[in-house]
Image: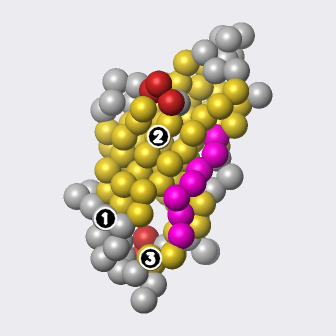
Amino acid sequence: QVQLVESGGGLVQPGGSLRLSCAASGNIFAIYAMGWYRQAPGKQRELVALITGGRSTTYADSVKGRFTISRDNAKNTVYLQMNGLKPEDTAVYYCNGDIRLPTMLRSTYWGQGTQVTVSS
């Protein structure tokens, strides 16, 4: 059983910062790419940022220069540092991980989501 648990969401004023964390736990053999996605009300889920096992990163154009994704492999954790937050960043943020189990089965797992609200 693999679980991804996000934390760090909340209410912040425009221009503020938040740091999201997502910790993977369970019977894990290896974690490859990890990513952050978000879904605003009435909109489709979209990729925010992705980091590979080799630490290559990809960002949505809307967050480039403001958000930074990083990972701590020793802790099976991925982070999303969000600076210069805007009201349009308001959404539920989900993390996911491309994970291989000791059985060699490889699947994508998702966290339960954490709410980020940017409002004055």
Question: Judging from the image, what secondary structure is the residue with disc 2 in?
Answer: strand
The range drawn in magenta is 4-10
Could you tell me which residue is drawn at 57 percent across and 54 percent down? Answer: 7
In this view, 100 is above or below 97: above
What separation in Å lies between label 1 and label 3 (alpha carbons)? 11 Å
- Residue 7 belongs to magenta span: yes
Front one among 61 and 1: 1
- Three-letter code for the amino acid on which mark 3 is drawn: Val
In this view, 69 is above or below 15: above
* N-term mark: 1 or 3: 3
Could you tell me which residue is drawn at 41 percent across and 63 percent down? Answer: 18
Query: Which residue is the site of mark 1?
Result: 83
Query: Which residue is the site of mark 3?
Result: 12
Horizontal and vertical percent position of residue 118: 45, 78
Left or right of 44: which side holds 112?
right
Tag shown at residue 78? 2
Front one among 36 and 11: 11
Could you tell me which residue is drawn at 70 percent across and 27 percent down? Answer: 26
Is residue 61 in sight in this rendering?
A: no
The reply to whether dot 2 and dot 1 touch (C-beta < 8 Å) is no
